[in-house]
């Protein structure tokens, strides 16, 4: 511990050395540990207790910078933590003086800082998110990149907002989750589950077999049904669409997904008993059958029979029309009654 006054010593250093000399001279003295607790002279010295920083303190080789400016009203980077190799800093840290302050972490790729993750404390004047209060935002963006920040924001209303842009919260939402529309996953996650919003709809994928893996699934179910309206359909002896003139018994599957489609085909037998009737579901948009023909015997002449159809169908795109096809294997006779024939779907996932 150097106690000799030297040229260039600060006023505080000189006062300390003089005080130490006076104490030592009177036989009291202080220990090295006592000095270490309040006084740092050179590299390798340590200190304890609170440190009040004015100006800028830098320790690049240790990977940690603390930058402050007591005279400033806006801090570009109050705290920056950098992880880098031994190549040296070839690219300055990104700055953003529009923020009141944030904690920044940067990754070094050997030649430049490639990415930046920021924890941002936003000010009340930042009105673009539709809130008067401050925000806590976690951002990731390429250094000097032109793409928008990917943000996770904790809002003043206690809402968690996941968005690649600053998104406005729904009115009156408190303690909720808001996920802005993004881009759907094209593959299953590894040992986990992924959920997102696209087209205003929740979707998900999982890594668990038979639990949402292998396809994009919808979180919210949908359903619709349609009964026939119009003239009863006279059956031919070759398969054809059951058409009622006014409204056919058909449904439009609204999105890609997997559905349960059910139909009730109400048949009035002709004048001859024991005719064999066939019915099936068909995707007329893609000209593809859904499932197989279902058969039933017509029973007595002028009797009534029903064919119940129930099929699982997966479609890769929206707006697929599913309708009923039927025929009489025995001869071109018998009718499908419009008002008692209907079809419905439920989207499963």
Image (spheres, rainbow, N blue to C red):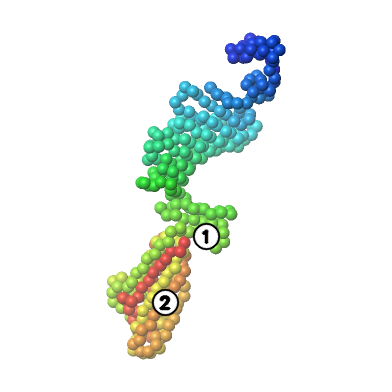
Residue closer to the observer: 296 or 98 = 98
Q: Position of residue 182 (x, y in %)?
A: 45, 49
Gap in Å between the C-alphas at discs 1 and 2? 29 Å
Residue at horizontal 46 percent and vertical 24 percent from the top: 72
Horizontal side, residue 234 vs residue 255: left or right = left
- Is any part of residue 317 visible from this angle? no
Horizontal side, residue 71 vs residue 301: left or right = right
Compared with 256, 161 (above or below) is above
Residue closer to the observer: 186 or 38 = 38
Compared with 41, 84 (above or below) is below
Q: Which residue is mark 1?
A: 212
Residue closer to the observer: 36 or 329 = 36
Q: Position of residue 316 (x, y in %)?
A: 46, 61
Label 2: which secondary element: strand
Residue at horizontal 49 percent and vertical 29 percent from the top: 76
Which disc number belongs to residue 299? none
Label 1: which secondary element: loop
Horizontal side, residue 123 vs residue 247: left or right = right
Q: Which residue is mark 2?
A: 308
Q: Position of residue 88 (x, y in %)?
A: 62, 30
- Give the quarter of the image for residue 157: top left
């Amino acid at each position: 511990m150097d106690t000799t006054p030297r040229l260039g010593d600060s006023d505080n250093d000189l006062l300390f050395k003089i005080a130490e000399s006076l104490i030592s001279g009177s036989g009291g003295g202080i220990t090295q540990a006592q000095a270490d607790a309040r006084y740092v002279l050179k590299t390798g010295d340590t200190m304890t207790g609170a440190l009040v920083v004015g100006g800028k303190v830098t320790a690049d080789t240790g990977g940690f910078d603390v930058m402050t400016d007591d005279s400033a009203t806006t801090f570009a980077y109050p705290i920056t933590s950098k992880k880098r190799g031994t190549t040296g800093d070839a690219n300055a840290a990104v700055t953003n003086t529009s923020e009141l302050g944030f904690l920044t972490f940067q990754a070094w790729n050997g030649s430049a800082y490639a990415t930046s993750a920021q924890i941002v404390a936003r000010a009340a004047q930042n009105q673009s998110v539709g809130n008067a209060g401050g925000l806590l935002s976690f951002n990731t963006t390429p250094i000097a990149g032109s793409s928008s920040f990917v943000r996770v924001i904790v809002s003043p209303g206690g809402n968690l907002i996941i968005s690649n842009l600053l998104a406005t919260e729904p009115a009156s939402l408190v303690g909720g989750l808001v996920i802005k529309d993004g881009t759907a996953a094209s593959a299953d996650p590894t040992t986990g589950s992924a959920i997102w919003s696209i087209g205003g709809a929740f979707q998900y994928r999982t890594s668990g077999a038979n639990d949402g893996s292998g396809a994009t699934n919808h979180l919210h179910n949908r359903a619709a049904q349609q009964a026939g309206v119009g003239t009863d359909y006279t059956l031919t002896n070759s398969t054809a669409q059951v058409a009622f003139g006014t409204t056919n018994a058909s449904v439009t599957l609204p999105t890609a997904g997997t559905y349960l489609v059910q139909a009730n085909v109400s048949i009035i037998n002709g004048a001859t008993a024991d005719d064999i009737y066939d019915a099936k579901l068909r995707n007329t948009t893609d000209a593809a059958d859904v499932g197989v023909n279902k058969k039933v015997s017509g029973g007595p002449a002028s009797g009534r029979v029903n064919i119940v159809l129930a099929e699982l169908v997966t479609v890769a795109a929206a707006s697929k029309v599913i309708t009923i096809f039927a025929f009489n294997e025995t001869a071109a006779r018998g009718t499908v009654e419009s008002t008692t024939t209907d079809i419905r779907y439920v989207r499963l996932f």
